[in-house]
Every structure is written in C-alpha cells, then in structure tokens.
Amino acid sequence: MNKRIESTQNSLVKHWKKLVTIRKERDQTKEFLVEGFHLVEEALIRQDTVIQLLVREDIEIPAHWTAPVIEITAAVAKEISETEQTQGVFAYCKQPQYEETAQDNWKKLLLIDAVQDPGNIGTMIRTADAAGLDGVILGKGCADPYNPKTVRSAQGSHFHIPVIRAELSSWIDRLKNNKITIIGTGLQNAVSLNELKPQSDFAVLVGNEGSGVDAELLSTADQVVKIPLYGQAESLNVAVATGILLYSLRAE
C-alpha cells in the first residue's frame, strides 16, 4: 500500500516546497523536484535519480513507473506545484553527479558565463543535448540549473547531458591542455560565423544577455566569432544564438 500525505504542514511537504522555491535548499541537499508526466518519465529513465514519486490521489500513473509512490491530496499538490494547472505528478530527485575522471573525455562543450535567465539556461541545456554535446559548464552568475523554470525549459535534458557548475577559467585551461579549440562569442576582433568550418572537437563560450562574455575570459579564447545580423534587430537572444553556433560548428 502506498504511503499517503494529507497535510501541507507535513515536514516532507515543507522540504519539497523549499526545493521548488529556495536555491539554497537545492544546493545544500543536492535534490530537486520535477513536475508533470513528461519530466517524471525522463527522470525515471535515468537510474538512481528518483527518490520518490508524488502522485495526486485522483491521478493514475503508468504501470511501468516502478519507483516508490507517495499519494498526496490536491492541497499538497497545489502547495508544491510551480505551475497554474498542475498535472498532479511529481518526482522527488537527486541531482545527477559526474565523476571527475570522465570529464577528461569530453570533447564538445558549451561554456556559459553569467546568463541569468532560467528559461535561457534551460533552453541552452536542451539545445546542447540536441546537438550531441558532451557537457554544459555553468560559470559564475548563471541561473540555477535546477530552478523549476530551468528544468521545465530543458524538457528532460538534465537527465541526458551532464550539467556542471564550475570556474570557467579552470575549464578553459583544462580544455586547452587537451587541444580543444575555445570559440568565444563577441563583437570585437571577431570573424563572421560564416567563415568558420564545422569541427569535431570544440568548446563554445557564450555570455550574459546584456554584457556578453567577461572580457578576461574572452581574451583566452582561440577565436572570437559573431553571428551576422541581416535585419534591423540589434542582437539575438543568447539561447537562439547558442543554437545557431552549436549547429554551425557541429561536424557530423
């Protein structure tokens, strides 16, 4: 028989609510909550990620969902939901962790400097996943990858591609030692994207929505590239620009 929680004052419910609303709680516990059938399905595919499924009492879940289930009331579901129209299913998850030794084999990477919008970060994670990259490195000032808005924008890609929070300068040194070309994005001393050829190994460095990549970081890039603008818009959204860059550089 499934465990059942009816009160929004239950200690577990309070913890789940904090995972949705407070970054510090997610950082300290290395846990997060996902909501909705699609994201729960994606979480379950990755082994040893789902701690428990939280299912509203009126919802029937697929038979192949075999993780431990806690039945919750509509009031509890509303308390922990981040959406206006909740589907009533949640997965209480551990944040994926990645061995340091495995990271030395990563040859295609997205490095993100101080991108603050969770939706942009989620879209960039999803795009890097779609483009077949080995990992995404989030530097200082980036939105939390486990913010519910980030998770929703990534549409399950958190469970497919490694997402690491780290010092970008250290990663750039490491990649250069491994002979990986660092391609920064900027306007000064930049070549047009049209002049670059697809590559088998690369790291793309993109930056803040307003100010771009930090100048000191950008100075360490092997090449600086800009995307030509043919209309009257001043710039591209950083997530859109990232998609164009990754697919332009990606060799088959």
Image: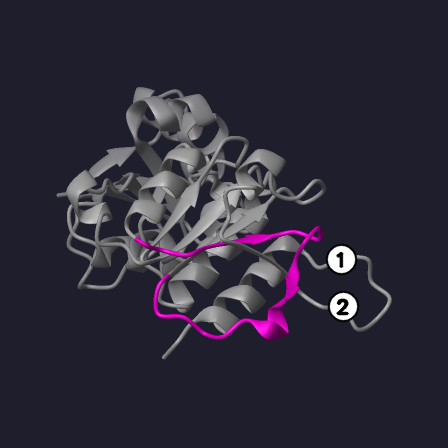
Magenta span has 130?
no
> Where residue 171 appears, x then y in whole percent?
37, 40
Q: Mark 2 and 1 residues: CB-CB less than 8 Å, in contact?
A: yes
Main SS category, magenta section: loop
Locate residue 50: give its quadrant.
top left
The structure residue drawn at horizontal position 51% and vertical position 48%, both measured from the top left corner, is: 221
Determine which of the numbered discs, if any, sits on residue 216 in the image.
Answer: none
Q: Residue furthest bottom?
A: 252
Label 1 CA crowd tier, 10 Å (few <14, some 14–19, many 20+): few
> Where residue 14 appears, x then y in whole percent?
39, 23
Left or right of 130 in this view: 96: left
Determine which of the numbered discs, if any, sits on residue 229 in the image.
Answer: 2
Residue 130 seen by the camera: yes
Amino acid carrying label 2: it is Leu
Determine which of the numbered discs, if any, sits on residue 235 in the image.
Answer: 1
The residue tagged with tag 2: helix, strand or loop? loop
User: In the rendered image, which quarter contains the C terminus?
Assistant: bottom left
Left or right of 191 in this view: 12: left
Q: Nearer the viewer, residue 234 or 200?
A: 200
Q: Which residues are magenta?
A: 179-201
